[in-house]
Image (cartoon, rainbow, N blue to C red):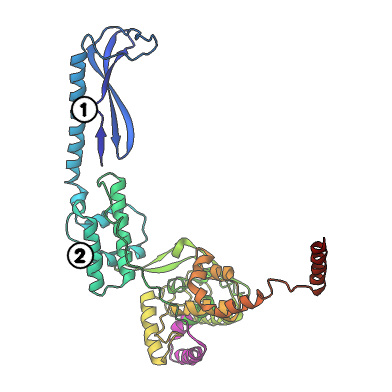
């Protein structure tokens, strides 16, 4: 917090009781914001008289008590400066003496952060604490050196940038509550992360996947097989699939599910510190409705019949992809990802970029199939995926639309109309007449 105080002036001021007294005035500028402070000195002065020009209320500060008032003004100014210095010194014993790990902890504690998000932040903390020293002593050069050292150590640019963003936000918070004067991250630019291309399952591997799913059904692993099918048929995230209950499926509790009904992604199972948690806040807080098609209906009907056979028809609170014998225990997303990796390796599945396929890539498979193969518009796909904006969908999947770009350019052919022969001859005749004149 920076402060600037003017030398100040004294002037005569009439009090409410009619007496006159010297008043001290100072201009105080704190962090660029200017205010004027006034204080009665308690020193009497002669009644105010008109100036020689006969107009102004302020006159030259001379006369009775002027010297004493000037002394009070100087003492008051020094007192304000001393109080500012004491405040600045006091902050050195507070949060600004923390290391950066404690600083970001304090910052995160002031925000409403989902537990699953906070778990990711704690993974970034181990990178932030590599910057040694008190928060108040960190300089831009220290931030730049940390970025360089992380790059040399092989830390990915995405991780460095995420760590940098959290550290910068923590410093901005410290500046906003006036315990630090500046943010050392501001002049430093983090590395630009390389965007990972989506890796959807291509047509050949989809045939492999279909055959492998049939083997899962036969091996009494239908809960995993159906979780995979729901991901392919809906584009839902693994946490949303694990958190899907029968009360979120139209007609499931009344045994009248139909194609054209909807799934409601109202819940998600999140991985947090020390375990998992069922929450009513899906990612981006975007609750959405996913229509049920014929393929999805077949999966849902089969799963419903199995749980009803074991537990009866009161199934509203049961989870869709839980094991039928324990339907109140949701499928752990971490376990689902682990089971998928084992399944993927046995099936020998690869994505369209010839890399191993993660469970989340099934969501990319749904999106790219919808946009590229079935020519579904981006706005509709964004709604199905639960993206906050169609731009998110377009930015991520635009590179998968080369055919659309070519078709668009073909449609744009002929933007300049062909010249009509009769119009051309008419123009030439008019030009000849003008030349003859």
**Spot occupied by residue 101 in the image (x, y as percentages of width and height):** 22, 59
Taking the image as shown, residue 419 lies to the left or right of residue 275, namely right
Main SS of the magenta part reads: helix
Residue 432 in which image quadrant: bottom right
Residue 258 in which image quadrant: bottom right
Q: Is residue 332 visible?
A: no
Q: Earlier in the sequence, mark 2 or mark 1?
A: 1
| Residue lying at 34% horizontally and 70% vertically, measured from the top left | 158
Taking the image as shown, residue 361 lies to the left or right of residue 233, namely left
Residue furthest to the front = 436
User: What number is the disc on residue 77?
Assistant: 1
Label 2, label 1: how many angstroms apart (C-alpha)?
A: 43 Å
Residue span colored magenta: 200-227
| Residue lying at 26% horizontally and 75% vertically, measured from the top left | 154
The image quadrant where one finds the N terminus is top left
The image shows residue 259, relative to residue 389, as above or below, that is below
| Residue lying at 40% horizontally and 81% vertically, measured from the top left | 358
Relative depth, front residue between 1 and 247: 1
Q: Magenta includes 221?
A: yes
């Amino acid at each position: 917090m920076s402060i600037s105080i003017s030398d100040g002036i004294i002037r005569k001021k009439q009090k409410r009781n009619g007496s006159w007294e010297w008043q001290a005035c100072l201009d105080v500028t704190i962090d660029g914001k200017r205010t004027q402070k006034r204080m009665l000195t308690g020193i009497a002065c002669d009644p105010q008289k008109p100036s020689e020009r006969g107009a102004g209320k302020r006159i030259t500060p001379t006369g009775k008590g002027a010297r004493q008032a000037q002394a009070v003004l100087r003492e008051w100014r020094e007192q304000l400066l001393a109080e500012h210095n004491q405040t600045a010194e006091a902050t050195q014993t507070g949060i600004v003496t923390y290391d950066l790990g404690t600083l970001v902890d304090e910052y995160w504690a002031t925000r409403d952060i989902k537990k699953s998000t906070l778990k990711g932040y704690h993974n970034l903390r181990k990178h932030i604490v590599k910057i040694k020293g008190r928060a108040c002593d960190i300089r831009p050069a220290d931030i730049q050196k940390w970025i360089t050292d992380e790059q040399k150590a092989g830390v990915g640019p995405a991780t460095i940038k995420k760590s940098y963003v959290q550290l910068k936000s923590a410093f901005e918070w410290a500046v906003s509550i006036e315990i630090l004067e500046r943010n050392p991250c501001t002049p430093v630019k983090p590395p630009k992360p390389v965007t990972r291309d989506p890796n959807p399952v291509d047509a050949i591997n989809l045939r492999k996947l279909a055959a492998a799913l049939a083997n899962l059904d036969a091996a009494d692993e239908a809960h995993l097989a159906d979780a995979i099918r729901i991901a392919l048929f809906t584009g839902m995230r693994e946490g949303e699939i694990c958190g899907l209950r029968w009360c979120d499926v139209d007609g499931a509790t009344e045994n009248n599910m139909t194609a054209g009904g909807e799934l409601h992604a109202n819940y998600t199972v999140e991985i947090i510190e020390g375990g998992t948690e069922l929450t009513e806040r899906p990612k981006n807080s975007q609750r959405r409705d996913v229509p049920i098609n014929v393929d999805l209906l077949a999966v849902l009907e089969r799963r419903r019949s199995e749980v009803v056979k074991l537990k009866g028809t009161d199934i509203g609170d049961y989870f869709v992809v839980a094991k039928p014998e324990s339907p109140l225990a949701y499928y752990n997303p971490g376990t689902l990802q682990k089971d998928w990796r084992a399944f993927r390796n046995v099936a020998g599945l690869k994505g369209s970029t010839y890399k191993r396929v993660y469970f989340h890539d099934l969501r990319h498979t749904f999106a790219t199939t919808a946009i590229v193969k079935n020519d579904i518009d981006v706005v509709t796909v964004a709604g199905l995926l639960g993206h906050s904006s169609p731009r998110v969908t377009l930015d991520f999947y635009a590179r998968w639309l080369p055919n659309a770009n070519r078709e668009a350019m073909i449609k744009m052919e002929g933007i300049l109309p062909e010249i009509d022969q009769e119009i051309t001859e008419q123009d030439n005749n008019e030009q000849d007449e003008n030349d003859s004149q």
